[in-house]
Amino acid sequence: MDIAAIAPQVNSLKSFFNQGQTRSVNWRRQQLLQLKKMTEDHEQEIVEALQQDLGKCRQEAWTAEVGYLLSDINHSLKHLTKWTKRRRVSTPMVAQPASSFLLPEPKGVVLIIGAWNYPFQLLLAPLVAAIAAGNCAVLKPSELAVNISSLLAKLVPMYLDQKAFLLVEGGVEQTTEVLKQPFDHVFYTGGEQVGKIVMRAATDHLTPVTLELGGKSPCIVDQDTNLTITARRIVWSKWMNAGQTCVAPDYVIVSKAFSQPLIDAIKHQLEEFYGKDSSNNPDYGRIINERHHARLVSYLEGQNVVHGGQTDSQQRYFAPTLVLNPDLHSPLMQEEIFGPILPIITVDKIDQAIPLINNRPKPLALYIYTNNTSFSDQTIQQTSAGSVCINDGMMFMTNPNLPFGGIGNSGMGSYHGQFGFDTFSHLKSVMKRPFIMDVKLRYPPFSKFKLSILKKLL
Ligand code: NAD
């Protein structure tokens, strides 16, 4: 899009928002149904674009992108009326008689910036929440997922109200220009460095931000676990989308004594999922581009690779790879991996995992595999993370009643289900008082007597 056209177009969204049409629940429902129709009508093209961008197989493209979005839309449609209603709250004695409530109102025109790894749903799931809450929105897909970006640029104006929604394609130049506009909320999904740029830009207009970032999500494996299922779930959640998932387990912590059985079980499971040679397996994805491929290759320098390690930059192929006991100061353990390498760190006793995690930035997700409830309870209580899943990988993402978002370096704010609706709403507080019983205690002239009564009431 022409840079000069961005500001006037955002302004026209603002004018449309001010007309009040988006406040109607019917209008919101209509837009959500249109988004659903767009997804259903073009499912095949969406899946193909994901295949071209990330080598995503049909099943992953459906479950983690298309189906995920459809279920998000259905959930929002089901609860929309309830979410938009007044939320009554109690009123203290001092303000009686009165009624008090929160009234969710749309924030206005919001900006949603998506990332490339789940380029369809990471852009559109926040949009579902923004529409449900009655906002207009500017969408900025990631330029790295070229095919999804251009497909959505074609489809969004065909299905959604063009007076309320604008999709801006492009890279840093376009995003920088978009970020100069005075939005009512900015919702960003991506890496930490750009997250800081987004937050800095938002301060100019005092715009609230949601930052859905990443980080190194640890995975603790206790010896007291079901080894086969643990390995299966780790392999599923790590190597889905070739490890390019913000909530993939970044590294495993396991006791020395249990490390070899775990490594063997993971290798066995990898072979069961992707065969002896995953380079020809259609269920195994590709790295988004050569730059990220080279970054991942560099992580293996000087490391103890105990499985995999084969790469082909032309094919953007990177085999599922295990590294045993990497140097904790190496780039592999300092940066988010965001690819198919799984470091395995051994400790003498499994509860040493807790200080190891606490000495690092707060992760987006934390995984604990154990039958020992007191160990999992202790770990949840003594560590900090955006979300925790006990005995599985990213399954927690399927529950819209759990907010999804990071803490500290892994982000701020959250969405999914009603949490997304609330993110894009202002919960306006309203108190309504009748004219009866106008007690004069709070009015001048003041007296010791009035003050003593007030002290008891407040
Ligand atoms: P990316 O390169 O696609 O960038 C994200 C967005 O930022 C894009 O739309 C891009 O145009 C924009 N951008 C890039 N550089 C910019 C700049 N200088 N100024 C303004 N805008 C700019 O994505 P990425 O950052 O490589 O994404 C990977 C990261 O995203 C990982 O850290 C991952 O964990 C995180 N992530 C988080 C979630 C989540 O839900 N928490 C989901 C997916 C990815």
Image (cartoon, rainbow, N blue to C red):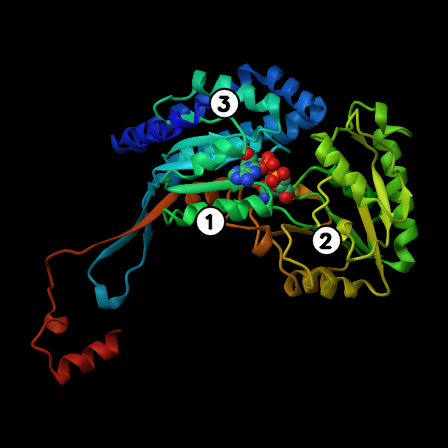
Q: Is residue 211 visible?
A: yes
Amino acid type, label 2: Gln
Asked which secondary structure carries label 1, the reply is helix
Task: Tell me: residue 377, above or below residue 141.
Answer: below
- Whether label 1 touches label 3, CB < 8 Å: no
Identity of the residue drawn at 26% across and 32% down: 20
Identity of the residue drawn at 59% across and 23% down: 148
The answer for how far apart the CA atoms under marks 1 and 3 are is: 34 Å
Q: Is residue 43 left or right of residue 178?
A: right
Asked which secondary structure carries label 2, the reply is helix
Q: Nearer the viewer, mark 1 or mark 2?
A: 1
> Disc 3 marks which residue?
36
Disc assigned to residue 334: 2
Asked which secondary structure carries label 3, the reply is helix
> Disc 1 marks which residue?
200
Q: Earlier in the sequence, mark 1 or mark 3?
A: 3
Residue 214 image offset from top left, x and y in percent: 62, 46
Q: Residues within 10 Å of mark 3 (few under 14, many from 20)?
A: many
Q: Is residue 397 visible?
A: no
